[in-house]
Amino acid sequence: MTINIRRADRSRPEPLWHQAEQALRALIADGTWPDGTQLPNEGKLSELLGVSRITVRHALRNIEEAGLLRREHGRGTFVRTSTVTAGVRGLTSFTQEMADRGLVVGSRVLEMVELPASDDVAAALEIAEGDAVVKVRRLRAGNNLPIGIQTAFLPSARVPGFLGIGQVVPSLYEDLRNRFGISPMEAREIYRVGTVSADDAGLLEVAAGSPAFIVQRITSDAQGPFEFTVSTMRGDRYEIRSRLHL
């Protein structure tokens, strides 16, 4: 198969590793290399791009750290466009995380209802138990592949008329900003290892009991907590990476 790849141009001001990285990312983004594709080895990529192996290695490392590639010892490097990588980052929505990785976000509302806050929801949102909250449960996907189920709770007092607006746009934060003037300033997250419940298994297209990350997030603005979200993320499509320094 002939690969139409953009070769590095030494007359351009951008570093060669950056040009190589962008050329490789383009092949992933346009579907030339779909999920699961094995990349040519470093020698072949060096030849195709017109750069050294060290430059290729630099580009591949950056793309891998962005969660778009996986390296398997003894096998090679493979595209993994359906994986979301969480780590040290700014306060972003799932939609923005997907966009940052060149993935097409998918979102389907499973439930949207107002109900009394349970004890744990009330504690997270710093409201009284029994106060009204809006529950929004959504299936989240990347490139049409299910990644997780997110259940968000919002204090009804902060989002009057929320249930009357119809379907939520893919980014809840965008919706809250545009309709209610609520902008996130800070979030606290807790990750723990868990399993996919029987209720969620079919939606996530895995067997019940499959490994998952259970993520809790409390997001606040200047007035205090406005969102408490519990997410179940497929263990094979969501990972956490950290870079440690002395």
Image (spheres, rainbow, N blue to C red):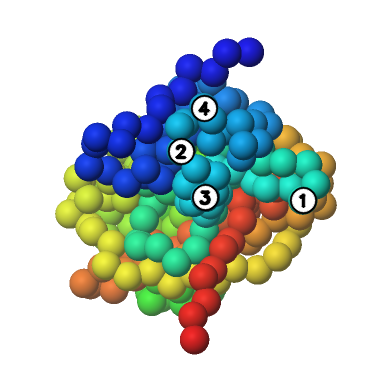
Tell me the distance, in whole angstroms, between the alpha carbons under discs 4 and 1: 23 Å
The residue that disc 2 covers is 51
Residue sitting at x 36%, y 56%: 92
- In the displayed image of the protein, which residue is found farthest to the top? 1
Residue 7 position (above or below residue 14): above
In three-dimensional space, the C-alpha distance between marks 2 and 3, rounded to whole angstroms, equals: 8 Å
Q: Which residue is mark 4?
A: 48
Q: Is residue 216 left or right of residue 38?
A: left
**Residue carrying label 1:** 73
Q: Secondary structure at mark 3?
A: helix
* Mark before the other along the chain sequence, 4 or 3: 4
**Where does the N terminus fall, quadrant-wise?**
top right
For marks 4 and 1, give the one nearer the viewer. 4
The amino acid type found where label 3 is placed reads: Ile
Q: CA distance from mark 4 to mark 3?
A: 14 Å
Residue at 61 percent of width and 56 percent of height: 239
Circle 3 Cα neighbour tier, 10 Å, few/some/many (<14 / 14–19 / ≥20): few
- The type of residue carrying mark 2 is Val
**SS for tag 1?**
loop
Residue that carries the numbered disc 3 in the rendered image: 54
- Of badges 1 and 2, nearer the viewer stands 2
Where disc 4 sits, the SS reads helix
* Residue closest to the eye, 239 or 22: 22
Q: CA distance from mark 4 to mark 2?
A: 8 Å
State the separation of the CA atoms marked 1 and 2. Answer: 24 Å
